[in-house]
Amino acid sequence: MTQIFCLDNYASFLTFANIAYILQKEKISRRQIYAIERDFVSIIGVLPMDENLLADSLEQEVKDFEDMLQYQCAIRTNCDCIVTINTKHFSSFTIIPIFTPTEFLEQYTE
């Protein structure tokens, strides 16, 4: 799954859904998931996604539609980079730097 982050501490609306999905698959309780999401929202701002972003994403035929949604959100909000475990999915269409989580941490913790 792909997450987008702006270095000013923002993530897309879809990122929060992805976090809940991953935690649920890991058998985390609903109460814990909500607590984690609340904590995350308290330190990470939420970038909106709307019908225009969806329309722009639908014009692109890429391997992973969710990645295009994340990409369009990153473009519209001038994000500094995209953090993903699926860097190959973005190689054909992105103009924003793409990092794996490890690369991101190495890049911005030095």
Image (tube, rainbow, N blue to C red):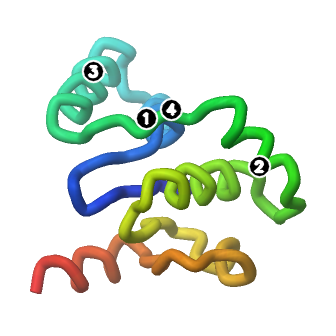
Q: Nearer the viewer, residue 74 or 27?
A: 74
Residue drawn at the location 58% of the way across and 79% of the way down: 95
Q: Residues within 10 Å of mark 2 (few under 14, many from 20)?
A: few
Residue indicated by mark 2? 56
Q: Position of residue 58 (x, y in %)?
A: 84, 47
> Is the residue 108 above or below the residue 44 in the image?
below
Q: Amino acid at mark 4?
A: Ala
Of the image marks 1 and 3, the number of the one nearer the N terminus: 1
Q: Amino acid at mark 3?
A: Gln
Circle 3 or circle 4, nearest the eye: 4
Of the image marks 1 and 2, the number of the one nearer the N terminus: 1
Q: Residue furthest top?
A: 31
Q: Is residue 57 visible?
A: yes
- SS of the residue at dot 3? helix
> Is the residue 8 above or below the residue 53 in the image?
below
> Is the residue 63 above or below the residue 29 in the image?
below
Q: Amino acid at mark 2?
A: Asp
Residue indicated by mark 1? 16
Q: Position of residue 79 (x, y in %)?
A: 40, 61
Answer whether labels 1 and 4 touch (C-beta < 8 Å): yes
Gap between marks 2 and 3 measured at Cα? 35 Å
Answer whether labels 2 and 3 touch (C-beta < 8 Å): no
> Is the residue 61 above or below the residue 102 in the image?
above
Gap between marks 1 and 2 measured at Cα? 21 Å
Q: Amino acid at mark 1?
A: Phe
Quadrant where the N terminus is found in the figure: bottom right
Residue indicated by mark 3? 32
Q: Position of residue 22 (x, y in %)?
A: 48, 40
